[in-house]
Image (spheres, rainbow, N blue to C red):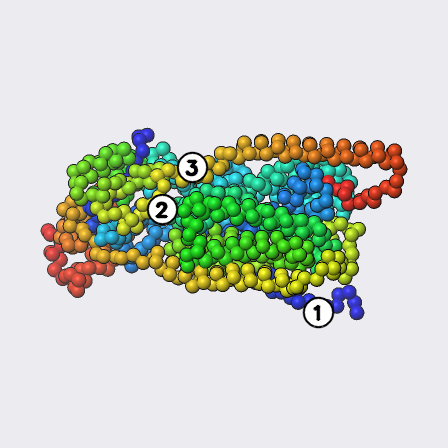
Amino acid sequence: MGDKKGLLLDTTLCIGCGACYEACKERNQLPRTATHFLEDRLSDQTYTVVKRRGGRFVRQLCMHCEVPTCVSVCPVGALEKTAMGPVIYHEARCIGCRYCMLACPFGIPKYEWRKILPRVRKCDLCADRLAAGRPTACAEVCPTGATRFGDRQALIEEARARIRAHPQKYVPRIYGLEEVGGTSVLLLSDVPFERLGYRTDLLSEPLPLLTWQVLQKIPNFVVVGSVLLGGIWWITNRRREVQLRERQQRELREPSAPESADSWHEEP
Amino acid sequence: MTRWSFRRPSFWQLVFAVILGAGLYSTVVRFTGGLGASTALSDAFPWGLWVGFDVLCGVALAAGGFTLSAVVYIFNIERFRPIIRPTILTAFLGYVLVIVALLFDLGRPYRIWHPLVMWNPHSVMFEVAWCVMLYTTVLALEFSPMVFERLRLERPLRILHALTVPLVILGVILSTLHQSSLGSLYLIVPEKLHPLWYSPLLPIFFFISAIALGCAMTIFESFLSYRAFRKRLEIDLLSDLGKVIVVTLAVYLVLKVQDLAGRGVLSRVLEPTYEGRMFLAEMLLGVIGPILLLSLRRIRTDHFGLFVSAVLVVLGFIMNRLNVSITGMEASSGVSYFPSWTELSVTLMIVALGFALFGAAAKYLPVFPETERLLASSLVEPPAVAVLRRPWIGTTPLVLILGGLFFIGAMGSAYSGLQHRERTLAAVSTREESEPQIAEGLKHLEVPPDVTFPQGEASPGPVIFRHASHLNWERPDCTICHHEPFRLLKASGSAASSPARDLHDERHCGRCHDGRTSFSVKEDCTACHRP
């Protein structure tokens, strides 16, 4: 049970039947948002779509990153990567800053713009079904095996086996194995991934490392900075005191007209 | 004439009233209609003007406060003390207004306190939230002596006096963190922010440019106070700040060029693209122009010259923050964003409130050294040097020419950038959509099993639904029937879906069995009902 689950999307097998789209709507009780599912796009009421891209049908949904950018950027921990793989949303925590939407490299989180008290909406990899030992809704209904559910590691083996078996067919790459540190949703394709609308220029390191490199220096910065500034103040203040003392002594020796004191210099 | 009789409002009072009216109306729209009704934001473009201008620029207003308080209290350079209070006031107002803007921008503003108790130290936004809260507190404490002095409360004054140095140190640390962390916010979008702005050095750029802005704002508001309240103009101090601006911006420029060259995108600065031109405009306006103007001693020590240079810095800074938050993000988002009038009017209202609060504080609190209030007319004295050595061109025309040159150059560049904008955005959104190949998938197609519908009371016989005979085998489409009434997922109880309603209607079988698409449900019953 503790194993990480995932999905393997094989675009060569997808026939664009829309079963995954409808099953997702059904499971999440979402209203109809387009006249035909192929015309639809991801929104606060649509968590997965099937697109015509590069001469293939290809799905879009949350990739459920291994080290999710959205989870790292959320200031209040409203997004969470669970042990089984899904990235889930705790709406009671969310303050609505939408940093997750800005930061997601796949552009997945969507917002309920029309609502007074909006929530972030996205695929949750059917976390409740997974917990009950069932596959995701989309995988359950897929009639061709284009969407396969399983243990992530097993799916990776499966994908490798398929590429080995048909090296002339597949692009020799599993999308999601390394992208931004790996994702729970993996893709196989026989056309280049960028033609499917999937970015191939993503870093192979998790994006949260980019900000963590800076953030982890903060405690050190605070301590060193405070001590440094305090030290500078100590020195400059001492110098001022000495100057004042010297001036007083000079004035004692040779009394002259006192300098005009500015009352305003007294404030903190 | 009694005290309460109607007084003709001045021009600026009228402007303020109009801005406030529009802003309040937009406030109502925002909080009754939601973000969708009140902003031009979208899923593709979730951060707009309220983040780019109100928050990113508002926070930077505080930079003058921490720079000068460090100079005066930590480095004990006493000379600058006379201008420290206005900068602290600006900083405090800046932060208060940022919080106001956040209340507009957050989807759930009433949960603004959540980061206090719900922690995520991996989030830059978490750091930003804490910096806003802590530094606003520090600024309130640094500002409060002005209030206590006015109320003649000695005890709190003495306590605050003792706390000054620790408060200033805390303030400098928090400010440094906060200014830079606003840049760090964008470190997480390497694939979205245009390479002219995305850099691992973003936090450093944000910090340095904030210092320059802080000094420029100090000059700017000193001049406004001088005009409005006939406060004394500390021209010596202000032109020294001008020097600080030159050095700061020069460091910024050198780092920027090094960074662009190091990442191999320096040549893109001059490319005739939307981003290239906007970047050029920002640099001309806010960096190169002010460096050149303020390097000239004549301009730096001239009232008008100093003021114009400061305005250039402020405008260039605003442009930089808007470029990072909007211009640089547009191409990757694939949509164009321009703020709605609601966003604009709220922003204007917040800016106007800032001016009004500053004015009120300057009027009623000891912000400026009281003893040094002088008549404006007595201040305009030409420097002795200018009388002795008459230059070939007056300083004011020189400022106008140079300042105007950079301003017009920047605007021209931005205008040319906007001409390229549509093309940049159009290039992203066009994608070919050829009819997909599905032959391979069809080989793997496993048609779902037959479904036996239970026989109703008046039914002539049970119906066995066969998926195989209802499928377009060339181009299968499950969504034709599997809309709501016919469930796809296995119900947790029974295996087969069993709608309780009559299946003959146009939502179910009758939808296609209508006599046109296929034979009608009113025709031969035994076509489906097999006894």
What residue sits right under mark 1 in the picture?
B8
Secondary structure of residue under mark 1:
loop
Numbered circle sitting on residue B87 = none
**Could you say which is closer to the camera, residue B196 or residue B101?**
B196
Q: Residue at x 24, y 52 (%)?
A: A54
Quarter containing the N terminus of chain B? bottom right
- Give the alpha-carbon distance from disc 1 to disc 3, as whole Å: 60 Å
| Residue B346 screen position, x and y as percent | 55, 58
Left or right relative to B168: residue A6: left
Q: Residue at x 22, y 59 (%)?
A: B511
Q: Distance between the Cα atoms at labels 3 and 2?
A: 17 Å
Asked if the residue under mark 2 is in contact with the one under mark 1, i.e. CB atoms within 8 Å, the reply is no
Within 10 Å of disc 1 (Cα), the crowding (few <14, some 14-19, many 20+) is few
Q: CA distance from mark 1 to mark 2?
A: 57 Å
Disc 1 residue type (three-letter) = Arg
Q: Are marks 1 and 3 on the same chain?
A: no
Residue drawn at (83%, 44%) of the image: A260
Residue B520 visible in the displayed image? no
- Check chain identity for marks 3 and 2: say if they share one: yes
Say whether disc 3 or disc 2 marks the residue closer to the N-terminus.
2
Residue pointed to by mark 2: A106
Q: Chain of mark 2?
A: A
Q: Chain of mark 3?
A: A
User: Looking at the rendered structure, which numbered label has been put on residue A209?
Assistant: 3
What residue is at 35 percent from the left and 43 percent from the top?
Answer: A202
Q: Is residue B240 above or below residue B229?
A: above
Q: Chain of mark 1?
A: B
The mark closer to the camera, 1 or 3, is: 3
Helix, strand or loop at mark 2: loop
Horizontal placement of B323 versus A66: left or right?
A: right
